[in-house]
Image (cartoon, coloured by chain):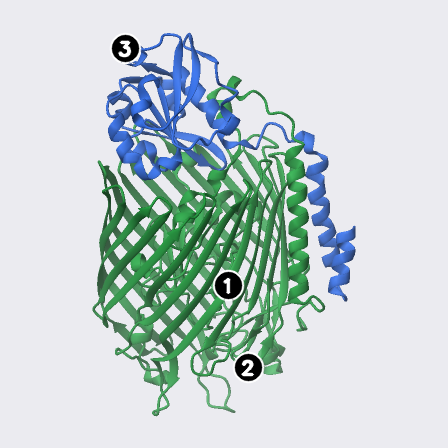
Amino acid sequence: MISRSGGKGGCSIGRLLQTMLLAGGIVITTAAAGWGEETVPPNLAELTIEELMNVTVYGASKFEQKLSEAPASVTVVTSDEIKKYGYRTLADIIRGQRGFQVSYDRNYSYVGVRGFGRTGDYNSRILLILDGHRINENIYDSISVGNEELLDVDLIDRVEFIRGAGSSLYGNNAFFGVINIISRKGVDFKGTELAGSAGSLDSYKGRASYGDSHPSGLAALISGSIYDSAGNKRLFYPEFNDPATNNGVAQDLDYERSYNLLGTFSYRDFTLQGAYVGREKAVPTASFGTVFNDPRYKTFDYRGYLDLKYGHAFGSLGVLARLFFDHYDYYSKSPYDLAAAGDPPNVVMNRDSADNNWWGSELQLTRTFLQKHRVIGGGEYQGNLTQRQDNYDIDPYFKYLDTSHLTKKWALYLQDEYTILPNLVLNAGVRYDHFDTFGAAVSPRAALIYSPVDKTSFKLIYGEAFRAPNSYELFYDVPAFDQKGNPALKPEKIRSYELVFEQLLGDHLRLIVNSFTSRIDNLISQQTDADDMLVFRNVAGAETTGVGTEIEGLWANGFKGNLSYTYQEARDSDTDDILVNSPQHMVKGRLTIPLVADKLFAGPELQYMSSRKTLGGNKLNGFVVANLTVFSQKLLPGLELSGSAYNLFDTRYRDPGGADLTQDSIEQDGRTFRVKLTYRF
Amino acid sequence: MTLLYLISKLCGVANRRQVTFAGLVVLLLVFPVLSGKALAMDGLAEYEVKSAFLYNFAKFVEWGAQGTAGDQQELGLCILGKDPFGGGMDAVKGRPVKNRRLVVKQINGIDEMGQCQILFISSSEKGRLSEILAAVGRSPVLTVSDIKNFAQTGGVIGFVTIDERIRFDINQAAAERADLQISSQLLKLARSVVQ
C-alpha cells in the first residue's frame, strides 16, 4: 500500500456543509411529498389485534419526552437503525454520533469526544453502561467498542448517548459522557433467531439466539455469537521498510477471532444477566517496540459479568437493587529482541497481563414528593477480589512485575428533579465517591430545563465530573522498562458548562443545538522524571469548547434522516495548542430511504472529519467516508437480508497512533463489503 | 441532475466516484416518491393505530356489574390530558362494541370520569400519574396509557413501542382491583403480564 494524502482534494468544509444542507433540504421536500401522496390507510378498526401488532408506526413518541427533559443532550440509536445502517460493532454506531470520533490502531479502537481523543488512553473518560451495569473494567478503567465489546450489536435494543459531565449520578469515568446500552430481552424475540454474515477480508460471523416470555412473568434470552476475520493479508508500514524487517510488510497479522455470550433471565421483579466476550487479535504494527512481522504477537481480552437485579415499585417508592460479579482478563504475548545492537537477534517472548475480578452492589430509591420533587437517591459499593498486573519473559523465564493492589470504593448520591413551574424544571444532584487509593471526589451538577412553548426546550447545565487514576497508572512499576508507578496520583477533574436548545419543527423534525465549554485539570500524563523513568503525573490541563448542531427527521413512510455538524476547539491549557487527534470540524449524515414500503430500505451514511494533528507533529488530512447498506425484511416471513459497502469511495485515510507505535499514524481499511442474513422462527 | 452538477462544481476536482454516489442517493430519494402509491399499509400514524387498539381492548375486556351500570347505550372512552389522537379517533368513534356505541370524550380531570369505561391517560399527565391512579382507585375503569412503565406503576394496560410496532403490557392485579376480566386471548398477546 502506498500512502497518499486523503482522497478528498477540493471540497472545503464550508462547501461540503453547503452541499449536505442542500441535500438535506431536498431530502426533506421529497419525503414530505412522498407522505402527502400516500393512499388512504385501511380502516384500522376492522383489524384484529394481531394484525395491528404487525403495523409499523412512526410517531412523535419516537422523540421521547424523556430526551428533552433529560439534564443533558441525549441522542438515541435503535436496533432498527443498527440493521438499516449495517452497523457491525459499537464503534460503527459511535462514528455516526454527533461529536464522537473513533480511531483504530489495528488492535484496539479509541473513542474521542468533544475534541478530546488523546492517543494512548484506553477509553476511560467515557462510561459505558449495559442494562444498568457498569462496563468499564478495574485496571485501565477502559471500555471496548470493537469486536472485544461485550454485547453483539444485534442484541442491542437501543443506545443512548448522554453528552457532558455525568459523574453526579454515575461517578467515575462519566467524564465527557455516558453511553447507555439497553439490550433486547426474551419478550422481543418470542422464538429463535439465526444470523450469519460474510464480508471482505475473509470476515465471517454467526449468531444463534433464543428468547421467549411466559404470562407467569418468566422471560429468558440466550444468545451466542462467533466471529472470525483473516484481516488484511499484507499491511505495509514504511517505517519498517528494511530487508531485515520483511521490507515493512506485516504478513497475515491482522486476523481477529471473538465470541460473545449473553443470557438474560427474568422472573417478576428479578433479572439475572450474564455476559461474556473473548477476543484474540494479532498485532501487525509491532507496537511497544516488539519485533516486526512476528506472528506470535497477539493480544487476548476476556470480559464478563453476572448481575442480579431487583426492581419494584412500592406505591410511589421505586426500589432498584443490584448485586454483581465481574471479570476482566487481558494478556499479550509479545516478541522482544534482547540482543545488543549489531548482535544476531535474540527474540524472547514476553507475557503482559491483567487478571481481575470484582464484585459490587447498588441500591437506588426513587420517589416523588409533593408532586413536584422527583428524588433519586442511592449508594454503591465495589470491592476488588483480584486486581493483578504481571509481566514476565516466558523462556528464559524472568519476572518483571507481579503486583496486586486490592482497592475498593463506595459512593452515595442524591438528585432532585424539581418541577418549579409546569414548563420549568431544576435538576440538581451531587455524588460523593470514596476511593481507598486517593480519597474523596465530589461531583455536583445542576441543570435548568425551560420549555417556553410546547415544542421548544432550553437547558442550561453546569456539571463537574472526575476520572480516578487507574491501577495501571498507580501501580505499573517496572524499573527494567524504565517505568514506575505513582500511588500519589489524584483524579482528573472536568468542569463543564453547556447550553442545549431543542426544537421540534412540525411533526417530523427535531433540531438540537448544543454548545459547551469545559475545563479539565489534573490531567494524568506520562512524564520522564529526572531519573529517566517514565511516570504518570497530574500535570496537564485542557480546555474544550464547541458547538454541535443536529437535525433529525422521521416520516410516516419509514423515511428517516439525521445530519449533524460539530465545531470544536480542544486546547492544551499550557501551550494553547490544539490537542493531538482532535478534529475541529465533523459532519455526519445518514438517511433511511424506503425503496419498497416496509420491505426494502437504503441506508447511506456520510462522515467527514477535518484534519488532525499526530503525536509526531504531523497533520493528517481531513477525509470523508461513505457507507451504504441496503436492507430488506419480510420478503419471506422472518427473513432479513442486507448488503453493505463500508468506505464506499475507498477513501485513503489515517488515524493518529499512540506513543507505543513507531508509526506516527495508521492507515485504515479501504472499501469493504458485507452481506448478512437473519432468520427468525 | 442539477445536484450532481452542483456537487461536481463545488468540489472542483471532484472524485467521479463521489459524484456517482451522490447520483445514487438522489435516485434513491426520488424513487419512493415515484412509488408513493405503494406506501399504503405500513408506517401509519402512531395514534391512529393506538385508537384501533383501544377499540379492540374493549372487545376483550368484561366489566363487572358496577362498571356497566350507567348509560346502557354507550361505552365511554375518555381521554385525560392533552389529546394526542388528533383526528385519529374518527375511525373508531361511534362503532359498536358489546351492543353499545363507543363514545369518545375529552375530560380535564378525574372528577369527570363518571361515564368512562376506558380511561386513556395522555403522556402530558406523566408528572401527575401516581395522583391520577390513586384517584381512580378501585373504580371499574380500564386505564390505558403510553406513559413509560404504566402497567408496572399500577395502570391496567400500558402501550410500548418496540421496533416501531405497538405492544402492550397488562397489569393483572390492577385489572382485578377494577373488577375487570381480561380475556386470556388478550393476555396471551401482551408483551408482559404484571401479576
In the rendered image, the quadrant that contains the N terminus of chain A is bottom right
> Which residue is rendered at x = 71% and y = 69% of the image?
A9
Disc 2 is placed on an element classified as loop
Amino acid carrying mark 1 in the image: Val
CA gap between label 2 and label 3 equals 82 Å
The amino acid type of the residue labelled 2 equals: Gly
Q: Looking at the picture, does residue A64 appear above or below residue A235? A: above
Q: Is residue A635 left or right of residue A122?
A: right
Using the rendered image, report if marks 1 and 2 lie on a common chain: yes
Separation of marks 1 and 2 at Cα, in angstroms: 26 Å
Where does label 2 land, which residue? A617
Which chain shows up in green?
A
Q: Position of residue B175 (x, y in %)?
A: 29, 22
Q: Pointer 2: residues within 10 angstroms few (<14), some, or many (20+)? A: few
Residue A560 rendering spot, x and y as whole percentages: 58, 44
The image shows residue A443 at horizontal and vertical percentages of: 29, 64
Q: Colour of chain B?
A: blue
Discs 2 and 3 carry the same chain letter: no
State which chain disc 3 sits on. B
Residue on which the image places disc 3:
B65
* Residue under the point 31% across and 18% down: B114
